[in-house]
Amino acid sequence: MSAAIQRFFGKKTPDELVKKWRQEIRSQQRGIQRQIQAIDNEEAKVKRSIKQVAKKGDVKNCRMLAKELIRSQRHKDRLYTSKAQMNSIIMQLEHQLATLKVAGSLQKSGEVMKLVNQLAKLPEISQTMQQMSMEMTKAGIMEEMIGDTMDMMDDDDIEEAADEEVNNVLFQITDGMLGEAGNVGPALEAKPVAQVEEDEDEEEGPELDMMQKRLQALKG
């Protein structure tokens, strides 16, 4: 079927499909960058709160915020990785366009399939990548995703931040007031948490809970 006939019946030509996918991926990249910026802004607020709470000796809430910060940073790392994977797909699509001029058809690509499968696990872009995978499957670029390739669970999402990692974060943010950096610096101070909680929970609790929820929302 010629390109003119395909367009007449509402079907996109291979060239048009590749350009459409490339445009959609770049749009998703811009959305992810906006989310990264939002997470950065929220993390800055959390770091300031950790410093303020640390000065009051509230170790419990400091550790809670530090754990949320670590989970947020892990999620942000995944977002950066996804942007790099999208760049790889765009490069593969550019190669498809070049091949299309010679071969006259799109070629199956194991690399594109692997990258699309990985990106489909990221909640922020899952729907778009699943739709793209179906279109690419119909176009002959990749095979149908089966089994657990669409599993959304990520080990990092359920892995608790290790105490050592929390201590390092607290040490860096509080300039050594709390936590420890490896074998250097003071150990986590065992301040009278119960007394602090009694004095501060009513004042700090709602604000800290709200901040924790905002970070969790950005990751969702």
Image (tube, rainbow, N blue to C red):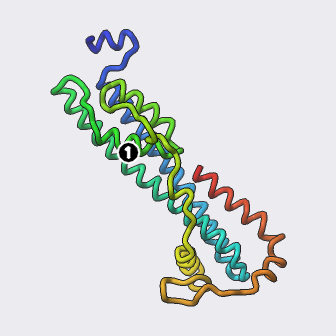
Q: Is residue 119 left or right of residue 90?
A: right
**Placement of 3 over or under 214, stated as above or below:** above
Near-viewer residue (115 or 41): 115
**Placement of 73 over or under 13, stated as above or below:** below
| Residue where numbered disc 1 is placed | 86
Packing grade of label 1 (10 A; few <14, some 14-19, many >=20) is many
**Residue 216 appears in which quarter of the rendering?**
bottom right
Tell me what residue is drawn at x 52 percent, y 62 percent: 73
Hey, which residue is sitting farthest left in the picture? 102
Give how far across and how far down residue 145 sits, in percent: 40, 35
Give how far across and how far down residue 61 sits, in percent: 70, 72
Give how far across and how far down residue 183 sits, in percent: 48, 88
**Residue 50 appears in which quarter of the rendering?**
bottom right
Tell me what residue is drawn at x 60 percent, y 52 percent: 218
Give how far across and how far down residue 74 sits, in percent: 50, 61
Hey, which residue is sitting farthest front in the picture? 147
**Placement of 129 over or under 213, stated as above or below:** above
Tell me what residue is drawn at x 50 percent, y 56 percent: 155
Question: How many dots with numbers?
Answer: 1
| Disc 1, SS | helix
Q: Is residue 99 left or right of residue 59?
A: left
Tell me what residue is drawn at x 33 percent, y 13 percent: 6
Near-viewer residue (3 or 154): 154
Question: Which amino acid type is shown beneath numbered disc 1?
Answer: Met
Query: If the image is split into quadrants, where does the N terminus sit?
Result: top left
